[in-house]
Image: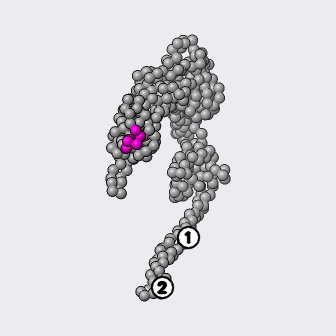
Amino acid sequence: MGNIPVKRAGAALVLLLAAAFVALAAAPCRAERIKDLAVFEGVRENPLIGYGLVVGLDGAGDNKGPAMQATINMLQRMGVSIDESDYKSKTTAAVMVTASLPPFPKPGTRINVTVSAMGDAKTLQGGTLLMTPLKAADGKVYAIAQGAVSVGGFVGGGGGTKVVKNHPTVGAIPGGATVEKDLPFTLGGGDSLRLFLHRQDFTNATRIAAKINEELKSDRASAVDPATVRIAVPEEYKGRLPELISSVEGLQVPIDMPARVTVNEKTGTVVIGENVKISPVAIAHGNLTIEIKTDFQVSQPAPFGPVGSETVVVPQKDVKTTESAASLMEVSGASLGEVVRALNALGVSPRDLIAILQALRTSGALRAELEVL
C-alpha cells in the first residue's frame, strides 16, 4: 500500500513531461511571408535619371559651369536671346534628377523624385525644378518631373560664420514626376511563374516549394536552385495570375537562417545571428596606447643681443606608452544569449570586439560565417 502514492507520483511526472514535450512541439516556429522572402520574375523597379535646372535660389546657385550654359540654351529655345557674358545670376543650379519606375506603371501615375546638385550651389532650399524628362537605360523617356524642391536642411550665417543643418544640396519632390508611357512587361513565362529568393538558400527554396504545393494541393512548385522556385500555373488559374500570386505571397514559411556574424569596421557595428555558437576558448585581449605630445616653446633673445639673434620656436616632444593588463577569460556559448553574455564579460569596445571575432573565426572557435563590410 505504501508504494501506491510513489507510483501515482511517477505517473503524474511522466504525464507532465509528455505534456511539456507536446507543448514544445506545438510551439509556433518563426515564419515569414513569401512576399518578404522572394519576388516574382519581372516584378521589379526600374531606375530613371534626368538632367535639369532648379531656379529661384536666393543667390545660392552655381557660380559657373553647366548651369549657366543650360539656362542660356533654355532661354534661347523660348525665344529669348541672351549673351553668356551678360548672364551673372546665381539663382540657378544644375541638378541630377533620379526616380524609380514601379512595376506595371500606368500613364498619369505620380512617383517621387530626388534632386541632387551637380555644381557649387550652396543649397537647393526654396528652388523649383523645371520640367525634366526622365529616361531609363534604353534611352527612352518614361516620366516628366517638375515641382518645388523640399530640402530637409538649411544654410545660414555670414561674415565668416556659417551654420549648416543636414544636407541642403539634396532635396526631394514627393509625387514630383508623372509617368508618361507604359513599360513593356509580360507577367510570367507562359504556363509558369518563377520566384527569385532575396537570399540564396537551398533549405528555404525547398520549404517555399513545399508550402506552395501544400496550398495548391498538387506538385506544381519545385526548387530549381537555391535562388529560384518554379510554379506551373494550374488550369483553374489560367488568365487569373494576379489571384495565384496573391495566394502565394501570403503563405507563411518557416525560414532557416545561416549562422552569420556581420561586422562593419568603418562604423564599429557588430550584428550576431541567432544560430551563432562559440566553442569553449580562453581569450586574452590587452590594449596598447601610445600618446605623443608636442609642446612648442619660444626662445626669446635677451635685450640688446648680438646682431642676427632672433626669436626661435623650439618643439618639445613627449612620448608615453601605456599597456593595460590582460588576463585570460573563458568564453563559450551555445545560444545567442550565452554568446552575448560571454562577449559582454570581456568589457571591450566594439572595434576590439571585431578583432576578437576575427581571431575566433581564424582559430575555429566561432562556429559561424564572418562577413566583413
Q: What residue is drawn where x is 54% and y is 55%?
A: 351
Quarter of the figure with residue 62 = top left
Please give left or right for residue 183 compared with residue 365 in the image. left
Kind of residue at disc 1: Thr
Give coordinates of residue 272: x percent, y percent: 55, 46
Q: Is residue 356 above or below residue 40?
A: below
For residue 328, above or below residue 59: below
Circle 2 — which element? loop
The three-letter amino acid code for the residue at tag 2 is: Val
Q: Which mark is residue 232?
A: none
Would residue 180 appear left or right of 223 to someone viewing this image?
Answer: left
Residue pictured at 54% horizontal, 72% vertical: 319
Question: Tag 2 or tag 1, which sits nearer the N-term?
Answer: 2
| Element type at mark 1 | strand
Where residue 83 appears, x then y in whole percent? 40, 38
Q: Please provide the residue range marked out in magenta.
A: 83-88
Residue 104 on image: x %, y %: 48, 22
Tag 1 residue: 321
Residue, disc 2: 307
The local crowd at label 2, few if under 14, some if 14 to 19, many if 20 or more residues have their Cα within 10 Å, is: few
Q: Nearer the viewer, residue 332 or 8?
A: 332
| Quarter in which the N terminus is drawn | top right
